[in-house]
Image (cartoon, rainbow, N blue to C red):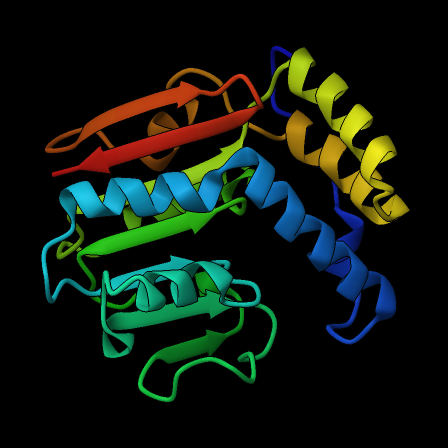
């Protein structure tokens, strides 16, 4: 797995209310819990977040991560802005903003924190460079959790899918995600987080690639 391979994921092609999509998103919540992505993002924010900072979450999905931030008291709903291709969830706070659509077709809002969970591996390096160039000057923190591109997570993923009885869509998309994942400093480099940024990247034994960048 020396180079990234980006292929379509089945879940991206399904309507929001498709039973297979609903099943797939449920599987993803389980995967998130096992990988600990939400827990790591919240721990990292607690160490660096300052009250009143605005937070933008890219690829918010069902809003679970941002809602956890609110419930934990870490931020206020009015400080949240989420982007996703799917529509605003029914439980999304009225005070928080939600933009439905392609994030490359909308300007990113001024915010001090940019959160991304299992989204950036969908994009080519050229798209990542474009996204990085559009990070607002107000942004101080970039926190991203993505798949780690390695053989061990691939094997562990196959075993998890079998044991947990995941939907065939999840079994397919998980391997596609791992092949499109990141290693070393690849993500920070692709986003162009150079001058003025300090970045830290590492992979966990369970296959999560974590990027923390601040300026």
Residue 174, given in percent of the width and then of the height, sits at: 73, 36
**Which residue: 77% across, 30% down?**
160
Residue that extends furthest to the bottom in the rendered view of this protein = 94
* Image quadrant where one finds the N terminus: top right
149 shown above or below 69: above
User: In the picture provided, is 209 more to the left or to the right than 166?
Assistant: left
- In this rendering, the count of numbered labels is 0
User: In the picture provided, is 71 more to the left or to the right than 3?
Assistant: left
190 shown above or below 122: above
Residue 35 occupies quadrant: top right
* Image quadrant where one finds the C terminus: top left
165 shown above or below 91: above
User: In the picture provided, is 17 more to the left or to the right than 148?
Assistant: right
Instruction: Using the rendered image of the protein, determine whether residue 129 is visible from the camera's viewpoint.
Output: no
Residue 69 occupies quadrant: bottom left
Residue 214, given in percent of the width and then of the height, sits at: 17, 37
**Which residue: 10% across, 33% down?**
196
**Which residue: 39% across, 19% down?**
202
Residue 128, given in percent of the width and then of the height, sits at: 44, 41
Residue 198, given in percent of the width and then of the height, sits at: 17, 28
Instruction: Using the rendered image of the protein, determine whether residue 34 is visible from the camera's viewpoint.
Output: yes
User: In the picture provided, is 100 more to the left or to the right than 199?
Assistant: right
């Amino acid at each position: 797995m020396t180079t990234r391979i980006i292929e379509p994921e089945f879940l991206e092609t399904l309507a929001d209310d498709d039973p297979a999509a609903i099943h797939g998103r449920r599987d993803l919540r389980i995967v998130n819990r096992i990988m600990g992505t939400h827990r790591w993002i919240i721990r990292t924010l607690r160490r660096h977040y300052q009250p009143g900072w605005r937070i933008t979450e890219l690829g918010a999905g069902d809003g679970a991560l941002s809602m956890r931030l609110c419930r934990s008291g870490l931020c206020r709903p009015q400080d949240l802005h989420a982007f996703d291709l799917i529509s605003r969830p029914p439980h999304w706070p009225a005070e928080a903003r939600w933009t439905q659509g392609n994030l490359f077709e909308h300007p990113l809002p001024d915010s001090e924190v940019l959160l991304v969970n299992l989204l950036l591996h969908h994009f080519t390096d050229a798209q990542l460079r474009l996204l990085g160039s559009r990070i607002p000057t107000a942004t101080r923190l970039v926190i991203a959790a993505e798949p780690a591109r390695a053989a061990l997570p691939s094997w562990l993923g196959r075993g998890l899918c079998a044991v947990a009885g995941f939907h065939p869509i999840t079994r397919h998309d998980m391997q596609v995600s791992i092949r499109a994942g990141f290693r070393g400093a690849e993500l920070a480099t692709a986003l162009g987080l150079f001058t003025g940024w300090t970045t830290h990247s590492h992979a966990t034994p369970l296959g999560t690639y974590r990027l923390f960048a601040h300026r």
